[in-house]
Structures are given as structure tokens and as C-alpha cells.
Amino acid sequence: MKINSSEYAVSAVREDQYPKDDLPEIALAGRSNVGKSSLINTLVNRKNLARTSSQPGKTQTLNFYLVNKSFYLVDVPGYGYAKVSQKKRQEFGEMIQDYLETRANLKGLIILVDSRHVPSKDDQSMYEYAQYLNLPILVVCTKIDKLKKSQLTKVKANLKKVFDLSYDNVSVLTFSSVTKTHVTELGDWIQEKIAE
Ligand code: GDP
């Protein structure tokens, strides 16, 4: 997919704030610090479209980025942020659930996990939940540049400990924002889903 334009469109915490122009949407979810902002910036070839920060959990809204004037990337707040209160976590959860369950424009969910670790309980919940909603899923294993060659074979084994990859409509990619590994494949997956 060739990216010709990208812009921040809107932030939303409830339905009446979502974009109203009826374009397809691809959501991105993952634990804080997993590399989600970096992946968005790498995909659209911009340094700072999505904020990358050393303060995990800061983004507490759904952020919509309009790409090629034809679809939205939707940055879902990072989950599993220990420093927010139970009440805040519940509010996040409800906001994310409302969006994922009701949004007809949503064509797929990208779940980011860190290549170096076995996915967390939160990652597993998100994966199972997306399955239950029948959403096409792309699991992206981030920061692959940090792995030694000998560790690469472990990535899929780690995923399989937590995710049932035999479901329909699940794809897996390794990715790096540093080396841009598989950025083309990432774009291709998005292209395919927004066309469906
Ligand atoms: P977010 O909280 O999920 O949006 O994560 P960020 O994109 O802000 O990244 C968190 C940290 O990981 C930052 O210090 C990034 O520079 C670093 N990071 C993100 N992606 C990569 C990657 O592919 N490779 C390496 N080595 N570091 C990365």
C-alpha cells in the first residue's frame, strides 16, 4: 500500500465523537510501551503522527488517524497500565468495548505483542475477545530487531502458549520500527481488510 497522506483526525471517548464519514477503520491495540505509536509512524512514514512517549498509558482516548483520505487507523489506549486506578481501568475497558462491539466500520484489529515475551493475560483477553466478535486479527510481534537470530524461532512458540492460532482470519507478522521489517506486509494486510 502506498501512503500518500496521513493526518490526525479526532480523539473520542464515546460514540457520538467517532468520525461520521463512514470510512473503513483498522484498530490497533496492545500493552503500553509495546511499540504501537512507533508502528503507526513507521507505516505512514512520519516521525511524529502518533505520539511515542516514555510515559506509558498517557493516551486515554481512541485516536483516529485518517490515511490516504480513505481509511482510519484507530489507536486504542494501551491496556495493562498498572499505575491507573481500578475505576480508570474499568472506564478504559468500557470505552474500548463500546467501540469494538458497535462499530460497523471496523474491519480488523491489529494486536501488538512484544516479540521478546510470552503474551500477557491482557493480550490473551483482547485476542479471545476479538475472536468472539469475529474480527479479522493481525498479531504483530514488535521490536524484532532486539532479538538475536537464534531467538527468532521462539517467537511463534511463545505466541502459541497463549493464543490459539488455528482460528480463521488470524495472521501473524514479526515487525520492527527500527529496521522497518515487514512494513510492506503490514500495509498489505490493512489494504486487504479495508477492501472487504
Ligand atoms: P506505545 O506505548 O505502544 O505507543 O510504544 P512506543 O511506540 O511509544 O514505543 C515504546 C518504546 O519502545 C520507545 O522507546 C520506542 O523507541 C521503542 N520501540 C518501539 N518500536 C521499536 C522497535 O521496533 N524496535 C526497538 N528497538 N524499539 C522500539
Image (tube, rainbow, N blue to C red):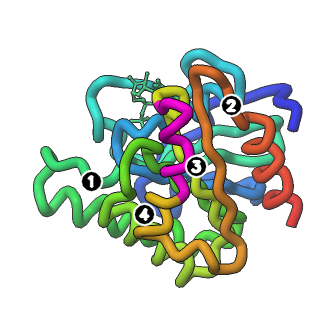
Query: Vertically, is 102 above or below 179?
Result: below
- Measure how far apart labels 3 and 4 are at the Cα level: 19 Å
Nearest the viewer among 132 and 87 is 132
Q: What x and y, as percent, mark residue 110?
A: 59, 55
Is 9 a magenta residue? no
Task: Find out if the beta carbon at label 2 lies less than 8 Å from the nearest ligand 1 atom.
Answer: no
- Return the disc, 3 or 1, that comes first in the chain's sequence: 1
Q: Estimate how packed mark 3 is, as few (under 14), some (14 to 19) or many (20 or more) residues with alpha carbons within 10 Å.
A: many
Task: Name the residue: 79% across, 27% down.
Answer: 5
Which label lies toward us, 3 or 4?
Answer: 3
Q: Which residue is mark 1?
A: 80
The mark nearer the N terminus, 2 or 1, is: 1
Q: Which residue is mark 4?
A: 96
Q: Answer above or below: position of 31 versus 15.
A: above
**Span of residues in magenta:** 147-156
In contact (CB < 8 Å): disc 2 and disc 4? no
In contact (CB < 8 Å): disc 4 and disc 1: no
Ligand 1 lies in quarter: top left
